[in-house]
Amino acid sequence: MTDTLHFAPAGRYQLRYLDTGGPGTPVVLIHGLAGDYTAWLAQVAALRDTYRVIAFDNRGAGASTQVDEPVSTQDLAQDTLALMDHCGIAQAHVVGRSMGGAVAQHMALQAPARVRSLVLCASFARLDPLGRRVLLNMREALEWRGSWADHARHSVQNFVSAGFFNANPERVAAIEALIGGETRLPACYSRQNEACQQHDTVAELHRISQPTLVMAGDADPICSMSATRWLAEGIPGARLEVFEDASHFFLMEQPGRFMQLLGDWLASH
């Protein structure tokens, strides 16, 4: 992919972003706690012929501004809305994975007219005790070891199912290498990890009126089926699709089904 990357102001921060595709309805892709805009490259390639696609690095990730300071999922929602303003986008489909889905919820709550539909992948309105423990353990592994490679080695098994882990050693190694190759400030990861722990929209979900698709892996320890049910049952009329024998990275474990569901959803809304 040879598209030019740009930077947009979001308050006192700069967000690196990709703006590609045609004149179709905009689709904004929000990545999760780990990684950056490149987490969406497969989806960008699949959607760009039909939609205008925006993928970007959250504050504190990738090449966007990195500052060791408290941050919330509400703050990241405001950043994303500022990016839409910069790009001249009045309304978009918003697709978020994990923490990105938490950010998307606040966008729908803060600026409902800006969100055409929501797609929430491996996400949560509130983490359950297991999800909190997994995130805490991953954060502590990074803080104790001070090494992204060590963090990845201690964390990778949380992202894929046991079956996938055992059957695909080369792909698991690639995921581990990707996570272990991070260059962001570890403190920014810790701050956003805490933002995920603090995120709680359960009591507000009833105010989300946009068409919403929730997708989850049934073997996900981070966003478990308990957290998934709180999310899907809390949003009026939300559609739930569960990926059996898949975990937090079900987008990678079952990419064909994921892309079919996403493509059909965007086309019908």
Image: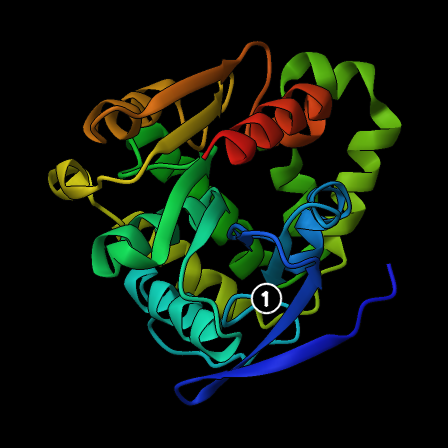
Residue furthest to the front in view is 23
Name the residue nearer the viewer: 67 or 249. Answer: 249
Judge whether 114 appears above or below 261 on screen: below
Name the residue nearer the viewer: 79 or 34. Answer: 79
Task: Say whether residue 48 is left or right of residue 24.
Answer: right
* Quarter of the image where one finds residue 194: bottom left
* Quarter of the image where one finds residue 258: top right
Question: How far across and down, in percent of the image, does residue 159 sit?
Answer: 60, 32
Task: Say whether residue 267 is left or right of residue 129.
Answer: right
Task: Say whether residue 83 is left or right of residue 20.
Answer: left
Q: Is residue 30 in view from this perspective?
A: no
Judge whether 155 appears above or below 5 on screen: above
The tally of labels here is: 1
Q: Residue at x 36, y 21 (%)?
A: 239
Q: Quadrant location of the N terminus?
A: bottom right
Q: Residue at x 61, y 39 (%)?
A: 155
Q: Residue at x 51, y 53 (%)?
A: 33
Question: How far across and down, in percent of the image, does residue 42 sit?
Answer: 75, 42
Secondary-structure class at tag 1: loop
Q: Is residue 239 in view from this perspective?
A: yes
Question: How far across and down, in percent of the image, does residue 172 sit?
Answer: 78, 31
Task: Say whether residue 235 is left or right of residue 185.
Answer: left
Instruction: Give, as a three-letter code, the residue at label 1.
Output: Asp
Q: Quadrant location of the C terminus?
A: top left
Mark 1, residues whose alpha carbon is within 10 Å: few (<14), some, or many (≥20)? Answer: many
Q: Residue at x 32, y 69 (%)?
A: 75
Q: Give the residue pinned by disc 1.
A: 57
Name the residue nearer the viewer: 212 or 11. Answer: 212
Residue furthest to the bottom in view is 12
Question: How far across and down, in percent of the image, does residue 149 sit?
Answer: 73, 53
Judge whether 242 appears above or below 269 on screen: above
